[in-house]
Amino acid sequence: MKVIVGSKNPVKLKATRNVLKKIYPQMGVQAKHVDSGVPDQPIGLEVTIQGAINRAKNAYSEEFDLSVGIESGLLEVPHSITGYLDLQWCAIYDGGKTTLGVSAGFEYPPLVIEKVLEGMEVGDVMDQVTGVDKLGQKTGAVSHLSRGLLDRTGNTEQCVLMAMIPMMNDDLYYK
């Protein structure tokens, strides 16, 4: 099994490898920088999912069995403190079918959302808040905010696994 991830982010690569090696013991994963085709800070369900799909499809070539696209974005959520939660979406593409999965969502502090709505990216704001450069390529904001109970790799693994469910149950989803 050969897999390509549409990002050079080490967290996305590690999370994909961690999940897929449990499903496909004989597997290799590579990373490739591709354009998501969406703004650097996706806001909204459609935009975030489209970014994941674009990453998966833009990374795919015939030499791979699967391509993986992962995109984090802010989604409007009523009754939340800030009006937004962060969710990571994963799209997995096999050259024909695309499957989707989503991670557990969490809410950023109001200051972060204010800065994002003014035009900054979440990652840049969280780097300032925490003092950690490139936090999103390390343990991630979710680790900082959950006090280490969940890191970004674990959060990303969730969306990868959820996107694999239809692929793992082909007979139930694609009769």
Image (tube, rainbow, N blue to C red):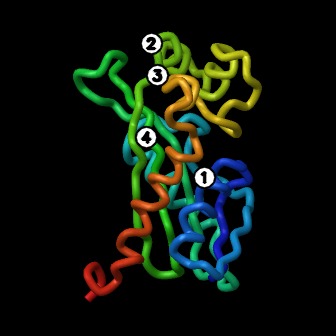
Per the model, the C-alpha gap separating discs 4 and 3 is 11 Å
Disc 4 versus disc 1: nearer the observer: 4
Label 1 vs label 2: CA separation?
27 Å
Question: Can you say which quadrant of the picture contains the C terminus?
Answer: bottom left
Image quarter hosting the N terminus? bottom right
Q: Earlier in the sequence, mark 1 or mark 2?
A: 1
Mark nearer the viewer, 3 or 1: 3
Question: Which residue is at the front of the view, 45 or 134?
Answer: 134
| Amino acid type of the residue tagged 3 in the rendering | Tyr
Which of the marked residues, 3 or 1, is nearer the chain's N terminus?
Answer: 1
Residue 97: x and y in percent read: 43, 77
As drawn, which residue projects farthest toward the top? 111
Which numbered disc, 4 or 3, marks the residue that appears first in the sequence? 4
Residue 14 found in image quarter: bottom right
Q: Of the residues shown, which amino acid type is indicated by label 4?
A: Leu
Q: Residue at label 4?
A: 87
Asked whether the beta carbons under mark 2 and mark 3 sit within 8 Å of each other, the answer is: yes
Mark 3, residue position: 108
Examine the rendered structure and indicate whether residue 62 appears above or below residue 35: below
Identified at 24% across, 26% down, the residue is 78
Looking at the rendered structure, the kind of residue marked 1 is Ser
Crowding around mark 3 (Cα neighbors within 10 Å: few <14, some 14 to 19, many 20+) is many
Sequence-wise first label, 2 or 4: 4
Q: Which residue is mark 1?
A: 36
How far apart, in angstroms, are the residues tagged by discs 4 and 1? 16 Å
Q: Is residue 55 left or right of residue 31?
A: left
